Amino acid sequence: MDLLQIPFHFLGATIRNNKKEIVELTTKCSLFQDPDKCAEASATLTNPQNRIDAEVGWLPGVTPESASQLLTLLESSAGNQQSDNPSTSTIKAQSLAAALAALPYTDSTTVADKVLEVLKLSRTTHSETDNLDSIQNLLGIDALNPLSHANLLAARISRLPDYTAVDVTGWILEIVRVFEEIKPKDILKTLNRERKIAGFPEIADVSVIEEKIQDRRRYYRRVIRSALEKLSDEERPQIVMAVIDSAVGDTWPLLIEDLVDVYESGIQDFLNKKEKNIETQDTRVREAADAELSDEDFTTTLDKFVQTVEKWDAIAQPIQINRKRQGLDHEDSLRVGKDARRLAIYLYNEHDKLESSQQLIGALQKVFAEIPEIAEQLAEDAEALDKITTAEEELSETLENLKTHIDELQQAVTLTNIKKQVEALQEAVDSGNPDYILDSRVRELVHAIEKWEALSQSIETNYTIITLLGNVALNLLNEHNKPDLALQIMKVTRDVFPEFLGITDSNRLTALLSCWDEVKSKLPMKIRYGLLADETPTVNAVGVVEIPCAHLSLLSDNDRKIIADTLTKAVGESVDIEFVSQPSDSESIPF
Amino acid sequence: MENFIGIDLGTTNSVICSYDGNNTKIWKSPEQNDVTPSAIYIDRNGNKYIGQRAYNIAPRSPDRCATLFKRFMGTSTPIELSDANHTFTPEECSAEVLKALFGYLPEEIRNDPETGTVITVPAAFNQMQKNATMQAAEMAGIGQVALMQEPVAAVMSVMRTRDTDGIFLIYDIGGGTLDIAIAESIGGTVNLLTQGGIQICGGRDFDRLLMDNLVRPWLLENFDFPEDFAGNPDYKSLIRLATWATERAKIELFAREDTRISLDEIETRTRDLNGDEIYLDIPLQRDTLDSLISDRIQDTITAARETLSEAGLTPNDVVEIIWIGGPTHYKPLRDKVAFELGIRGDRISVNPMTAVAEGASIFAESVDWNSQNRGRKDIRGQISSSGALSLTFKYIARTPSKSKIALQTEGPVPIGSEFEVKSLDTGWESGRRPFKNNATVDVTLTKPGENTFKVFVYDDVNRAIAIEQDEIIITKTAATVSAIPASHTISLEVLEKSGGPSKLLHLIQKGEPLPKKGTLPIPEAGESLKAGESVTAGSTNALIFKLWSGEIEEPVTDNQPIGLLKVSGTQFDSGHIPMGADLECSYEILDSGELKFEVSVPCIGATFDKVYHYGDTKVPEAHQITEDGEKVQERIKNISEAVEDPKLEQANQKIETALKSDPEESDLEKRLEQNQAILEAKELLHQVRKENLKEIRQIELNEVHTFYDMYVRQHAKSTEGKAFDNLVETAQRSIDNNENDFEDHLDELRGRNFEILWRQDWFVIQRFKYMADSPHLFADKDRFEELVHIGNNLMNHEDIQRILSNTKDLDESVIKSEVVDQLRNIVAQIASIPRIGATSNYDEMRDAAINILLES
């Protein structure tokens, strides 16, 4: 029951009035108010047992004068009226100051300091609500016993001028804190002290007080519920989480548990609506998968689903945390989690979307971390999917290895074959076999070369074969004057090893090899005779033309440029060149 | 002039009294007695006699007489006058007595339509009994009638004679019931702080004790009777006569130290098996009576102590005991009660026999007979004046002591104006008072009834200002009761969630002030009331609203059923009430404790009001009483193993008394007593549980936790283990904070134990085997055999999954009340469960533990 509805307030009685005084007040009250209500209030206050509810709901331990003034301020704050008259505010503030100064069980210096603050505030703002907000500061100190403090806080929460998320959070945190400080035995002592003054029999059993405090707790819960209901569905989870975050350890203050309970009952409709959104998104994901949308479009749809679940979870989060702490299930979360999980399974089982399924499971693991049953299942699912991924990868790797092995075997056979063919050709050439036999040998060689897979082999191996073929081609060209045969070999070498030759046009390679002398003749004498070695340039495995130099260190940049330009002009296009050191037979000194 | 009548409709005697505003008057019977026995006799010619004559003849012609029918009010027990070929209902019998009493009044009072009558009912009366009393009044054609509780009437009577403040204990013991009331007088206004009592406890019980312990044994010792003497119709008359003689002797003992229970042969007109004429000549001393009624008196003392405790009072707070009712004439009773309670009780302030009727007539004067619900007259009056001066004088129009007059003005107040109040009866003057808003004047009332005052208003030059209304009449009442506490908690049974356990939603709690109006649900409490199933117009589906009287939360069925209101499809022509539809209940509980209850269903725009079914409330048969008693005894035994509380012994004694009865007991009154004893035992059990709730809950929690640790945890997943531990902590917090959800958590914990066990093959198989060997657990025998047959086949194939499914089907067929017991039994068979505490013998350990489990 609200402070202003307690029979004490209704009758204008104090906690220290005796029975006769109460009856007198009742008679007076009956003149101006509903006599039945006055009689009911009187019956409550004069009955030693029924009175306890009113006592516990009131301001026990506060002097009647202070109580009266506090309630006057509370009543005046209900309309949230701005005071135009500064003197009124000052009067009220002064009354407040006087009231607070009269509070028992306080350090008077501290109270006086606070009172001064209040006076200053009231003089400057002229607002009654500011006065009451100043009470908030004052109520933070130990001026009141926790029960009276909590009752005032509850009354205040019911009369906030504005219900903003920040304000409501602050007030709830305060009442949560204060409620934890209420000790039934202390309340019993306080009440019996008051009863002694009022002439009522003492309360013997503390269990009665415990019961009444639980009744007050239910009232505070209702007040909190009303405050929450004044905020939007979006703000409420934030407030509740903020309050939950203030709790230390696993043991929550009782009112935090109550807060989550009232939050849960109030947010249920909103949660249900959000759950319907999830169902809609779920259907869309399935449809997208069934329609085999592009990866990008599908991912967009899936992301939307995840966002919807995350939004739902943000609302359900306080409830999940509470239930987990209590060891209980949250049926809605179980349902949503299981449905979402089923979607992930569907994506993999029906559409082989392993990655999407893993992505979804990963997101759900974060969302449903507070739901042990779901978290466990998701962890198992994630593990299972990881194993599938690993197994697929391993299988793929095995297949790859197998393929490589087969390739290697194939290549090994091919390499041997090439070597054999080269040997056979060389032998035939050296033996002076007729052309038709040489043709046949060249054809077999070319056939063997064509089977070679240059890109899957090491550079060294490729280079070995290129060198072998280059040598045999040169031999045919230079030693045996068989350019056609040489060309056939060079052509197939070019086709099989284009990356390694660097020159894709066999004509150009031929031109290079055949016109080196001409190229050399165009070079300055100094370079021709002084710097270049006698050897013919070669092409290495990566297609770079290696020009042997006798005195590499003396080859200036300009010299290199001249050589490159001349060669380029001769070949017809830019060629990669590298100058390699190779001393000449002659010891001639370059000039 | 209005006449106000009060009727004390007692179990053995009734009284009628009138009040004219000044004095009360008891209207005597034709025999010139203040009291009229509540007895009916029909002679051979069909003539009906009510009162003394019927009472005198009753012992000799028991089958032509009806007595003690008040004890059966609210039940459908027939009152058979077999020799007269007539059967009454208890209401009809009461109606006859009421008619007879009303007939004592002068015709001008009887026939005056303004006459209002208050009939008293015991505070311990439940709804059905109250409703039955109203019905009886209607049948008697009394006219305007209201009920009120006897203690309130007693208080009104007492306080009328006292002018000192203080707290009093009213000890009202009549023929059939005991009512205890704690009332406080403050300045003439009386507050009833609390009430208690025992529904079946009165002079009648003393008679029975004397009969059972003195007279019957004497008869059996001195004469030769057949074995079925108690129930033999040949001796029915003898027993009635003996009872009558016993009562007569008992009453004589009120005035003397000793007497004799005597009946001569001519009176008895009965012979024994030997042909000897039977007579009675039994000496009776006070000591004998005292010792026989000692336990019963002790019960009344206990009831008084409980009532005091409920009021938060000790004997030191009470000024004295006020004695009401015939048995309080017995000084040893008064002395014992006063001594044991430690409260002064040496005076008889009012006439114990007529005080209740007198108080009822005084109360009748305060009733607003023009209102439908017989509320109290408005105590406030006012006179107004408009014109130059707009003013109102408000005053307390009805008060037992001083009154107040207050001035309220509207508009500007002329400066210097004054007002004055003068008594037209005594000439008293208040003196001039400044004319200002809310100014008050205290006035003293010198005479009972109407006191007339006049108000005068003067301007600033002392000229009288005429006002339209200037006369004020204030009634000095004999006494005013400002608050009547509800004697019972009345609740509506609801489910917290579909399929969940029942809980009680209180309409009013014991001790709350009457009258009370309210609605359910209470929006401020965040409650909502929803339909638990759907009902379509024309269908036989129904929503049942069960109302209970009592405070026992668990199980709800331990309370007294009041009745039920049905919202059936046959009661509305069109529309549909879907499951989950909002419902609204509104109720009113009158001063007398009568309940009016109605249900609105917004979705079909209908209200179902005053559809009030009593249900079949016959006095239970003897074998039903025995069965019920045995169950309660078992519960007492189980709870005794967990806690020690003297109330358990009391409860046990009550049950033993009830169970001592003859299973063929045909005496209705005796069965009623036994049934009442069982109800009282249940109430004691509830109190023990409530007072030892923490300990009991702690034991229950420890047991389920230990069980889990020992037998289930090893099979649980780690998340299940953690969740279980968290829930144990939650349950522990419920215990520490005394919250209502502990039992839900306990059920959840137990459920989880078995959920995990169900996953174990060995458990499934053992469970199947156990159920297969227990056909008595199953209502549907065919289904049982079918499932057992399937299960046996599956066993052969070792198909554990299908065995599980089949076993669960079996499990669902078990008569539900046995499920938890049997589950525990099977687990106890599988694994030895050590008792909490040490015993050495395995079987004893297991059985003791099972008992603990069964109890929880």
Image (cartoon, rainbow, N blue to C red):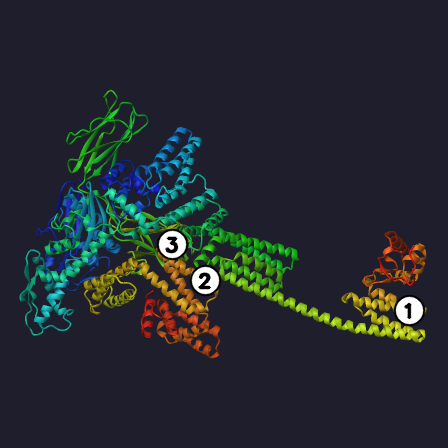
Identify the secondary structure beneath mark 1. helix
Between disc 2 and disc 3, the foreground one is 2
Residue B407 seen in render: yes
Identify the chain of the residue marked 2, using the numbered disc in the image: B
Circle 3 is placed at which residue position?
B572
Q: In the image, is residue B388 above or below residue B83? A: above
Circle 2 is placed at which residue position?
B722
Residue A294 or B287: which is nearer the viewer?
B287
Between disc 1 and disc 2, the foreground one is 1
Identify the chain of the residue marked 3, using the numbered disc in the image: B
| Quarter location, residue B814 | bottom left
Estimate the spatial distance between the alpha carbons at disc 2 and disc 3, rounded to whole Å. Answer: 52 Å
Count of residue discs: 3
Q: Which mark is residue B640?
A: none
Identify the secondary structure beneath mark 2. helix
- Identify the residue shown where x is 39% and y is 44%: A154
Quadrant where the C terminus of chain B is found in the figure: bottom left
Amino acid beneath label 3: Phe
Identify the secondary structure beneath mark 3. loop
Amino acid beneath label 2: Lys
- Identify the residue shown where x is 35% and y is 44%: A145
Identify the chain of the residue marked 1, using the numbered disc in the image: A
